[in-house]
Amino acid sequence: MGSRGSLAALVGVVLIGMTGFGIFLPIFPFLALELDATPTATTIAMGAYSLGQLMSSPFWGRLSDKVGRKPILIAGLIGGVFSYLWIARAGSVEELGAARLFGGLMAGNIGAAFAAAADLSDDRTRARNMGLLGAAVGFAFIAGPALGAFLIGAEPTRAEFARVCIISAALAAAAALVALLLFRETLPAHARTQSEHDRPRRVAMLMSRPALTRFVGVMFLMIAAQALMETTFGLWADIELSWGPREVGWTLAALGFGAVLLQGGGAGAASRAIGERMTLLIGLVLFAAGLGGLSVSHEPATMAASLTALVIGLGLATPALNALIAAQAAETERGAVMGLSQSASALGRVAGPLGAGAIFDVWGSGAPFAAAALLILAALFVALTEPAKEAFGRTP
């Protein structure tokens, strides 16, 4: 199998595996509520996955450089199978959190997939190959929640929750089988076991650049706000709209579809027309406005208007910010710089859910969205600070 066949298999593995992950997203808050969890416990259990991923990602990355991408890809998917099956049998929110933490600790497969795509790329094909994997992830986050909404009942029983978890496990197992049978190792033996002793020094050097540090800070704040919103949206919809996992699933699928459309075309067109700086700033303003509107919404019409602003803002800001971060690096530093950005993203996905439930419990169902809006306003302030403005001036 040539590089095209390996890339096709890789895209298939990511699409199948992440669809299984997406199926599970809209049902988790309702599964936790079924187990009499408080909003605080629910959001902490949801955030446990990102905590595990943050803790284990450097280990899986180094291991994939030593043993190759394929074993890590398969191991991560098999870990997902056990995590979903554990969730299906969980009898308490503590078990849910432990199962999510285990799933995050085993989640080396996505990092290995993107590393494999880089192995298969040259300067001419790198953007295309990364875009294909990104599109697979984006499509999975449309298909997954939609499929979850289709599978779950209007008033799901514990058995229906377990059935959806088992289907997620089956998809992860199918993805592992595709990786085993169709994916060919992309990292040759002579390229393995490269030293990482200089990594701390390299990271410190990158973080000494004021503009890069601020852009990475914007990334952290954006992702923390997004995670804060995502982990409480189902709880909010349950209280304010009397929605169940089916309605939440369809809504998340629609949001994913809008974000994919924007990131696939609209954001690029906006950046070419007005530049990455203005695209980022407009995106942040719309994102904050959508979150603020959501915090005072009590009916579907105002929710829809708020979510429209939110998804347009997020769809514009994310690609523009990634482009601005990449522009701060020389060609030989791009991997390290984007790795730094991904670390900030992972940290945001841990930090956001940690306080979300407590804010929900103490200040009400709309308060987490207001808190997320404040984080985006802070990101806007950071993006407008002097070193960042200097970097904007160098970027068309």
Image (cartoon, rainbow, N blue to C red):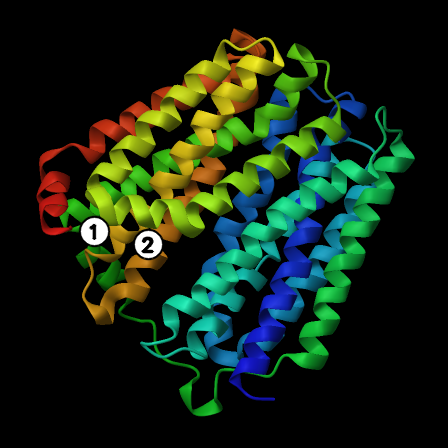
Image quarter for residue 91? top right
- Horizontal and vertical percent position of residue 226: 46, 33
Image quarter for residue 31? top right
Image quarter for residue 154? top right
Q: Quadrant of the N terminus?
A: bottom right
**Would you say 241 lies left or right of 134 here?**
right
In front of the other: 169 or 146: 146
In front of the other: 47 or 236: 236
Amino acid at the residue labelled 1: Met
94 w.r.t. 129: above or below:
above
**Would you say 270 lies left or right of 392 here?**
right
Q: Residue furthest bottom?
A: 190
Earlier in the chain: of badge 2 and badge 1, it is: 1
Tell whether label 1 touches label 2 (CB within 8 Å): yes
Amino acid at the residue labelled 2: Leu
The circle on residue 207 is: 1
The circle on residue 340 is: 2
Q: Residue at x 63, y 39 (%)?
A: 253
In front of the other: 165 or 289: 289
Q: Residue at x 53, y 79 (%)?
A: 68
- Horizontal and vertical percent position of residue 316: 36, 40
Q: Residue at x 64, y 34 (%)?
A: 45
257 w.r.t. 121: above or below:
above
Q: Number of labelled discs?
A: 2
